């Protein structure tokens, strides 16, 4: 399970291994603000370039993974799982409504964070769970994006988000109507 930052190599490897894969896409400014809160990117211009380059390198591989928007995963996970099951002829269950399952997933991500950072506890900035402090930090970064206004980089990232969002919508239509 990957978390927070996808590497294009993960999807190329998944294709070669015929493993199921879900490419999570999120609106660029929100994705970059979230990464900034986690301390993953310092320079906003580089973050927008990385966003665009990561997705651009996956063009043409969309038959080997499911594209899901951040909103779909948070609000309509059942549809995403149905698409995965249809595409990969799998039988993933959907016990997601049970709080203990959500807690178990969040704890797994927390353990990965602790291992990545070699810490005994998850720092607030890198915690996967929402908090007031993380929201306030994200708002600061969103304001910084507005203030710095790397317009061309934002435009490129938003075009890629729209492109992959259209792939997600096309996949949903074809897989849910199958």
Image: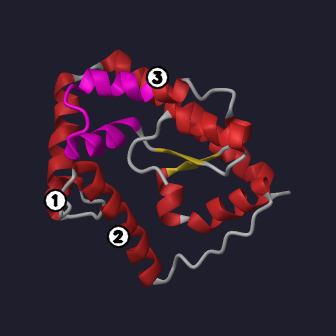
Q: Quadrant of residue 134?
A: bottom left
* Disc on the earlier residue, 1 or 3: 3
Q: Position of residue 3 (x, y in %)?
A: 41, 51
Marker disc for residue 107: 2
If the image is split into quadrants, where does the C terminus sit? bottom right
The residue to which callout 1 is attached is 124
- Earlier in the chain: of badge 3 and badge 2, it is 3
The scheme the figure's colours follow is: secondary structure
Query: Residue 150, located in which quarter of the rendered image?
Result: top left
C-alpha gap between disc 2 and disc 1:
14 Å
- Is most of the magenta stretch helix, strand or loop? helix
Q: Nearer the viewer, mark 2 or mark 1?
A: 2
Element type at mark 2: helix
Q: Which residue is mark 3?
A: 53
Task: Please report the residue visible at 76 percent of the width from the left and 55 percent of the height from the top.
Answer: 88
- Percent coordinates x, y for residue 45 in the rendering: 27, 21
Q: In the picture shown, does residue 159 fall above or below 38?
A: above
- Cα separation, mark 3 vs mark 2, equals 30 Å
Which stretch did the figure color magenta?
Answer: 28-52
Residue furthest top in the image: 152
Circle 3 Cα neighbour tier, 10 Å, few/some/many (<14 / 14–19 / ≥20): some
Percent x, y for residue 44? 24, 27
Q: Is 48 included in the stretch rendered in magenta?
A: yes
In the displayed structure image, the side of residue 100 where residue 168 appears, left or right: right
Residues at discs 3 and 2 in contact (Cβ within 8 Å): no
Q: How would you rate the neighbour count of disc 2 (Cα within 10 Å): few for under 14, some for 14-19, many for 20 or more?
A: some
Q: Residue at x 67, y 51 (%)?
A: 20
> Where in the figure is residue 144, as x and y percent of width and height?
16, 33
First in sequence: mark 2 vs mark 1 = 2
Location of residue 130 with respect to 103 vertically, above or below: above
């Amino acid at each position: 399970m990957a978390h927070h930052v996808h590497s294009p190599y993960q999807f190329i490897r998944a294709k070669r291994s015929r493993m199921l894969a879900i490419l999570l896409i999120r609106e660029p400014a929100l994705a970059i603000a979230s990464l900034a809160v986690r301390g993953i990117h310092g320079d906003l211009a580089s973050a927008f370039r990385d966003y665009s380059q990561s997705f651009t390198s996956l063009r043409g591989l969309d038959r080997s993974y499911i594209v899901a928007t951040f909103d779909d995963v948070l609000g309509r996970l059942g549809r995403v799982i149905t698409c995965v099951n249809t595409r990969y002829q799998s039988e993933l269950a959907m016990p997601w409504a049970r709080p203990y399952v959500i807690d178990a997933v969040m704890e797994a991500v927390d353990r990965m964070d602790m291992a990545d950072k070699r810490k005994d506890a998850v720092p607030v900035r890198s915690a996967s769970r929402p908090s007031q402090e993380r929201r306030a930090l994200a708002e600061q970064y969103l304001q910084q994006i507005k203030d710095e206004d790397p317009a061309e980089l934002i435009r490129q990232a938003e075009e890629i988000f729209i492109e992959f969002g259209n792939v997600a919508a096309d996949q949903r239509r074809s897989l849910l109507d199958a």
